[in-house]
Amino acid sequence: MIWSRRARALLAMATCAALAGCGIRPTGIISAGGAPNARGYAATITLYLVRGRSLVPVTRPGLPGQPNLAVQQLSVPPTARERAAGLRTEVHGRLSAEAAVDGSSPTRRAPVMDVRPYDPDARPTWSRTAKAQIACTAMAIPGTRSVNLWRGPYREKRTWETLTCGQFAVLLE
């Protein structure tokens, strides 16, 4: 087989590179300090549960990156400790909550939260207490100033109701 001068030069360079190694010399074990220690705490969320005819703020552990979790937690049964304190929820069925987008900017979040049943075909009937729970819980999320609550897929009626916690001030404990 006849090799060209160029092929021989490339083969010689590759052989030299392989024999030279990567240029890093071996070392012993180097100590880098103690083991990592996680000291972060999960943020707490505030939701409003019902005792008698009043709303009571309750805190639960949150999850990073899920600021709307508090609204979704309204449909979760109260914990044993909360039940022992006489707390319950008037929200039945899973909820979907998301910050509305400001109409003037497609990327800016508006201080309005849209809340609807998780089931898109649901026709909710919200009691006054359930509306209060949803509004006050959503407004406990930093930056939220009002709530758009889905009333159902009615063509002839407005399907969203705008709420604030202030509308239910008489229910707050």
Image (cartoon, grey):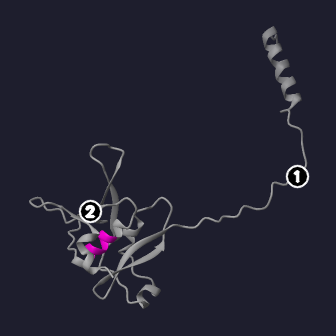
Please indicate whether residue 58 sits to the left or right of residue 160 in the image.
Answer: right
Closest to the observer: 151 or 163?
163
Mark 2 highlights which residue?
Answer: 120
Name which residue lies at 58% across and 67% down: 41
At which x and y percent is residue 60? 47, 74
Task: Check residue 29 in the rendering and tell me which mark sits there, or answer none.
Answer: 1
Q: Amino acid at mark 1?
A: Ile
Position above or below: 90 against 62: below
Residue 132 lies within the magenta run: yes
From the image, give the main secondary structure of the stretch colored magenta. helix
At which x and y percent is residue 53? 27, 86
Please indicate whether residue 10 sits to the left or right of residue 53 in the image.
Answer: right
Q: Residues within 10 Å of mark 1 (few under 14, many from 20)?
A: few
Residue 144: quadrant of the picture? bottom left
Name which residue lies at 82% across and 23% down: 14
Closest to the observer: 24 or 40?
40
Secondary structure category for the residue under label 2: loop
Name which residue lies at 45% across and 83% down: 79
Closest to the observer: 19 or 158?
158
For the record, the magenta segment spans 130-136
Residue 115 lies within the magenta run: no
Q: Nearer the viewer, mark 2 or mark 1?
A: 1
Q: Amino acid at mark 2?
A: Pro
Secondary structure category for the residue under label 1: loop
Position above or below: 67 against 126: above
Q: Outermost residue, top direction?
A: 5
Number of marks in the rendered image? 2
Task: Check residue 145 in the rendering and tell me which mark sits there, or answer none.
Answer: none
At which x and y percent is residue 31? 85, 54
